[in-house]
Amino acid sequence: MRDDSLLVPAIAIFAGIIGLVTWPFIAIFLHELGHATTAKLIGLAPTHLIIGHPDESDPLFSFRSFGCSVECWPLPFGGATIFATPPTERFKIFIITIGGPVVDGCVIFICLLL
């Protein structure tokens, strides 16, 4: 007979570690996606979504989605949404700026509901 009594706690610990490592990347991606989405809603075209801090090495991975290049770098400190033509009107800048924090607030609200 096998004793699998340690299997469930080991899986839970492994899942917790994976969650702690990936959560900063997911949170930054959602935040930057908020900026990009609000920019698209007001007629601007984001060209790059950068997740993490770029350095001399290559990104961990990159892909294209909805006409936008997404790059994920090894250090999950900050991010950026880059536009083909930067906004000049103050109202558009304000709307794009609050897009990320609004998504953060929605994520927090959903987490509290769970």
Image: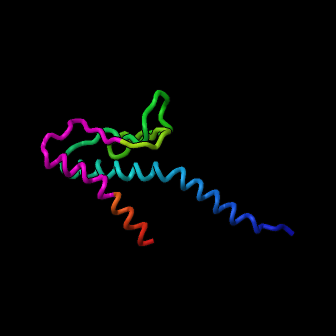
- Color style of the picture: rainbow
| Picture coordinates of residue 62, whole percent (x, y) | 45, 39
Instruction: Point out residue 113 in the picture as x, y percentages from the top left corner.
Output: 41, 72
Q: From where the camera sits, is residue 83 visible?
A: yes
Q: Relative to 29, does residue 88 appear above or below in the rendering?
A: above
The number of callouts visible is 0
- Span shown in magenta: 80-103
User: Could you tell me which quadrant the N terminus lies in?
Assistant: bottom right
Q: Is residue 64 visible?
A: no
Is 28 part of what is drawn in magenta?
no
83 falls in the magenta region? yes
Q: Quadrant of residue 101?
A: bottom left
Residue placed farthest to the top in the image? 56
Relative side of 20 to 26, left or right: right
Figure check: 26 above or below 2: above
Seen as rendered, the residue at the extreme bottom is 113
The spot of residue 79 in percent (x, y) is 37, 42
| Residue at x 48% of width, y 40% of height | 75
* Quadrant in the picture for the C terminus: bottom left
Which residue is the extreme one toward the right? 1
Q: Is residue 36 left or right of residue 87?
A: right
Toward the viewer: 28 or 83? 28
Q: Which residue shows up at 38% across the image and 62% down it?
A: 107
Residue for point 39% across, 67% down: 110
Above or below: residue 2 compared with residue 72: below
